[in-house]
Image: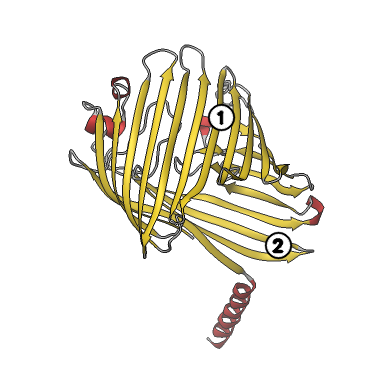
Amino acid sequence: MKKTTLIAAMALAGMAGAVQAVELSYSGYVRAGTGINVRGGTQVCFGLAGADTKWRLGNECDYVIEPNFVAKLASYEGSDWYVHVMPSVYHGWGPQGTNEPDTLTTRFGQIYAYGNKISGLANGKVWAGRRFYNRLQTGINDQFLENNDGNGAGIEEMDFGAAKVSVAFMMDPNNEATNNRFALPIRATGIKTLPNGELSVYVTPSAQLKSKNQVTLVEPADQPKGIALGLYQTVNGALGGNWLLGFKHDKTGDVKNTRVIAQYGSSLTPATALDVVAEYRINTAPNDGGNKWLAIGARTDTHLGGPFRLLFEAGHDQVKPDAGDTRNMTKFTVAAAASAGKDAGSRPTVRLFLTHAIWNEAARQTLSGRTQEVFGDKKSGTSIGIQAETWW
């Protein structure tokens, strides 16, 4: 008994020493809420068929929880070594075309190890695992201009003076639908091109690793090779605000996507922030599968006093398919909010919102999901709800 107690005490002491040697940091993102539509039932969110995004204020029918845990495990020759773990939960609202409740999706969105400030890699980082990678986001329409999330490994942020260079191998071996498709994202950031601006260059070739099933002797379905080029210029202080100007061309087999985008952020007054996004994209696909998409939208965020603020967002999308009539949709949201601060990005925030969308007949004929179920016989719809959002 005494021996067992002594061994247990020694083990606990060793664990305590190990815990003391680990530096743990914690961050994350959460959004959650509830809502109804004016015809009864849960909130309806509005998006146009063929558009790549939707305007997100008062237009998110889900909740997301993404806590991040980062543990510093060691230091060696000036480099620091970490493990990053992010479990996550995602849940959409209401039945989606069935009488069954939505499924609750839980997963490890990120789990990877890395070392940074490695002198032999130009003070860069080496990493391997599953992670959010190469995310370049526009914000009010929640669009990822670049996104290479998945499983992989790479060398990141190598500092060569004129630019910081990153390269990775990304693949999803857990997803049979991808048929062993891989990508080799390469990026160069921090390129000084203007006194108050920087250029970022993203190049992403992709292809398929083929392997015949040696039991069934079945060859995997062929997938075409792909190549994507993205150029993104930031300009700070122009016309009283900050700009992101982007161009991207993506070709996979016979399908081509070319887009230009501009985002502008500034302060209209000391109390009101403005964010504007405009984008034009051409999708070229065989057999009349292509379309042209135009989007423009803006959000204002005004501090009223204390924790209270007023937000307004308007966004318009137009999709002109190669075959068929032009579709359009315009969405408006007004929201009263209470936030932990006077700045537009202050979080946590709780919003009470009203969202109204209108669309034409061509758009009505292509409605889907909850929008089609509730407002499929109309050319407009309205939802009211409450949402909380925070990051830390």
Indicate the position of residue 96 as horizontal and vertical percent values.
Answer: 29, 36
Q: Which of 301/58 is in front? A: 301
Crowd band around label 2 with a 10 angstrom C-alpha radius: few (<14), some (14–19), many (20+): some
User: Which element type, helix, strand or loop, lies under badge 2?
Assistant: strand
Indicate the position of residue 187 as horizontal and vertical percent values.
Answer: 68, 39
In the image, what residue occupies the spot 25% across and 46% down? Answer: 384
Tell me the colour scheme of the image: secondary structure
Q: Earlier in the sequence, mark 2 or mark 1?
A: 2
- Name above or below for residue 166 compared with residue 386: above
In the image, what residue occupies the spot 47% across and 11% down? Answer: 287
Check the image and name the residue furthest to the bottom. 2
Indicate the position of residue 327 as horizontal and vertical percent values.
Answer: 36, 22
Residue 385 at least partly seen: yes
In the image, what residue occupies the spot 43% across and 29% down? Answer: 51
- Name above or below for residue 262 compared with residue 318: below
Name which residue type carries label 1.
Answer: Val
For disc 2, the marked residue is 80
Name which residue type carries label 2.
Answer: Asp
- Location of residue 234 (image quadrant): top right
Q: How many discs mark residues in the rendered view? A: 2
- Name above or below for residue 47 compared with residue 112: above
Q: Are marks 2 and 1 in contact (CB under 8 Å)?
A: no
Check the image and name the residue furthest to the left. 39
For disc 1, the marked residue is 260
Q: Which of 290/384 is in front? A: 384
Indicate the position of residue 335 as horizontal and vertical percent values.
Answer: 32, 50
Q: In the image, is 371 to the left or to the right of 89?
A: left
- Name above or below for residue 279 compared with residue 90: above
Crowd band around label 1 with a 10 angstrom C-alpha radius: few (<14), some (14–19), many (20+): some
